[in-house]
Amino acid sequence: MAETPADSVGAFIPGPRVERPGSPGGPLAGLAFAVKDLFDVAGAVTTYGNPDWGRSHGVAVATAPAVAALLQAGADLKGKTKTVELAYGLTGENVWHGTPLNPAAPDRFPGGSSCGSAAAVAAGLVDFALGTDTGGSVRIPASYCGVFGIRPSWGAVNLAGACALGPSYDTCGWFAREAAVLARVGEVLLPGEAGGTLGPLLKVDDAWINAEPGTARALAPALAAAEDLLGRALPVEVAPEGLAALYENFRCAQAEEAWATLGRWVEQANPSFGPGVKERFAAAKAMDPAKAAAGRAFRRMFTARMRALLAGGAVLAYPTSPTEAPRLAISLEAQNAVRERTMGVTAIAGLAGLVEVTLPLGRVEGVPVGLSLVAAPGRDRQLLALAARLAQAMGQATSQP
Amino acid sequence: MAETPADSVGAFIPGPRVERPGSPGGPLAGLAFAVKDLFDVAGAVTTYGNPDWGRSHGVAVATAPAVAALLQAGADLKGKTKTVELAYGLTGENVWHGTPLNPAAPDRFPGGSSCGSAAAVAAGLVDFALGTDTGGSVRIPASYCGVFGIRPSWGAVNLAGACALGPSYDTCGWFAREAAVLARVGEVLLPGEAGGTLGPLLKVDDAWINAEPGTARALAPALAAAEDLLGRALPVEVAPEGLAALYENFRCAQAEEAWATLGRWVEQANPSFGPGVKERFAAAKAMDPAKAAAGRAFRRMFTARMRALLAGGAVLAYPTSPTEAPRLAISLEAQNAVRERTMGVTAIAGLAGLVEVTLPLGRVEGVPVGLSLVAAPGRDRQLLALAARLAQAMGQATSQP
């Protein structure tokens, strides 16, 4: 097993490092990885980012199957990484464990909730890292930290032994600095899939217009390179009701599910929460059932719309996040404004269970921004292969430090 | 797609049959299957065995990945099968949908909670059927109806899109009349696994002593046949504290988890429940946290014990259930006595996350009883192969009608 990396960016949870050697040989032999501290590793306490959660839950009895599959495939576990408390936030802040440094922009948020996994990969501490993505928790930190990330099709990767936030939205994703490593992990974790080719490329106008002009400019060369691979992009609008409506429907339906999943523990344990998380759980508790029902109804309609659009193999392209990582110094109000604008975009794949790969193919004054490629559920392996080709074409098979 | 089978035993939920054709070709082409009505199939309402559940949950947006994998592998879905309400019971009774007939013993319970799946397979309506097993819900109906059944290692099969009862115990299992079909389904649903051989055979004295003398006698030839394959069985005791202690610890820890998982819905929807189910949810709500904590602590200790015993490939053998299927006419008190005695045995694999295959290799006055083979987590494919060899050796590659 490779040596234990020093934690130069505060990516790992405090305390003794949770390490497990991979099985000898195997397709991932020689690779080091980390897992977000909401995956169970037998013999260790899972904190879910919150000390009260750790205290009120025992030592894990079994290792989550996704983690076990990686160990079985030969990768070495080097530690458990920080997460936003109960995975309920996008900045990556954690007041109990300390917010990981964004290695690509030290005065900015790393993004969350899978903040430690993104930071550990971006800083080169490990080759890849597991996270989870309910409403953007892999895609956003990948974009902010300048690494590759995937949110698989909903249900494609087993989430047994991982703490839930919203089971009908939760997915097990991962980060890597190299597109080829992102794909190799997929060979282990993803189910086999039918063949078929991807295309045409669809430029999602709603999301490009929603993005900062600087973000859109920074990603224009990457879009052009994608057009070289798949042909000229056709403009489409996926949300004529507006991305703000996507966000609002996602928020209401998902908050209800978050409270159904975690509300009982929150009420019984009465945990201390950091700012933002506390307010979100209060809002989840108070969520109007009629609004949540409307959100669920919208979701069904939107899912049908997206699946029809993508059934033949079409690939959506748009900026993963409308902005680069926000500065650490901004106010909670400003954070919330970024969050709403961001989640209007991340809700596209989130509501419809789509697979999304984000590629670190742009910079805004030196700060990373990601381009997303999005496809129909079940096309995960095809999309990872396309992402690797695109990164190669851009001369970015490895993300730039 | 093969024709739609008539429902001769009341195995399917009432209403229009939920059918989906399998993809052309594939390793399961030509096989017909059914799924317990707690797996989502896109476009259909999942009832979870309870009309109020169906009414308060919408049409499923996505198909559960386990079901999608079977369709992708070419099998044809022929319908959704009855389940005990919220999967919380072992007799197979459902007062809303009607209790399926046990095709092997029409005056007896089919066993549950996956009652409809077991009955559909036993009656020859489909080749195999998905169920779930938290505390015995595949193993018991398989034993009662005289078919093959598997409860996989905890976490081995993806449960996304399936209603949960106790996530740290829940597994996705299945039934078949032929051991070879049971194994073929495993090739599609189970992860690849490391090699290694199984053995020695361990005869679990606690469970043989707990069984009715008639059950033990009926399964003695099957045990002898297993010894022909793996060598003379070594006697072991897995629960010196008594099987009743296993049941009690399982009950307390799992009830807490059941209430955490479903209590909020039960309190909000205030559903009508049939007898038995209603009392179990009331008990789950009232569960003493200290008892549940003791149950969880016992579980950790027992898991460590069993994993040490089985790590080298050892296989446990014992009667799946201490009795054949109880008669429909027995009182609720008598049902509960059977339940307690049965769950002391099913808790072995349930607490420790072990893989268990039950084989229909005995009859007590014509009524089926199953022999269980149990191995360490992750040895599912090896155990299925062993079960097929044992069935072949007994001349029972296909279960007897």
Image: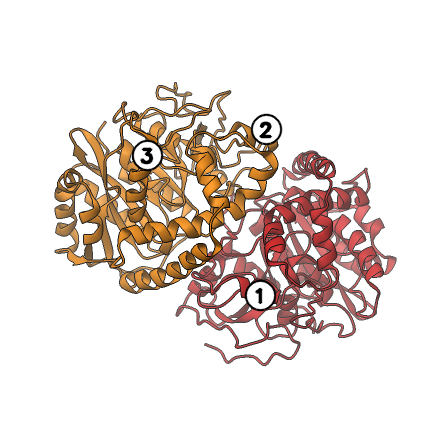
Chain colours: A red, B orange
Q: Spatial distance from mark 2 to mark 1, Cα to Cα?
A: 41 Å
**Viewer-closest of B358 and A263:** A263
**Viewer-closest of A299 and B182:** A299
> In the image, what residue type sits under mark 3?
Glu
> In the image, what residue type sits under mark 2?
Arg
Q: Spatial distance from mark 3 to mark 2, Cα to Cα?
A: 31 Å
> Horizontal and vertical percent for residue A30?
48, 72
Disc on res. A299: none
Badge 3 crowding class, 10 Å Cα cut-off, few under 14, some 14 to 19, many 20 or more, is few
User: Tag 1, which chain?
Assistant: A
Badge 2 crowding class, 10 Å Cα cut-off, few under 14, some 14 to 19, many 20 or more, is few
Q: Secondary structure at mark 2?
A: helix
Note whether residue B176 is visible: no
> Horizontal and vertical percent for residue B322?
23, 42
Q: Residue at x 57, y 72 (%)?
A: A126
Q: Quadrant of residue A127?
A: bottom right
Residue A15 lies left or right of residue B183; in this view the side is right
Residue bearing the label numbered 2? B55
Q: Secondary structure at mark 1?
A: strand
Residue B366 lies left or right of residue B49; in this view the side is left
Disc on res. A129: 1
Q: Residue at x 78, y 55 (%)?
A: A339
Q: Secondary structure at mark 3?
A: helix
Residue A300 higher or lower than A28, as above or below: above
Residue bearing the label numbered 3? B333
Note whether residue B259 is visible: yes
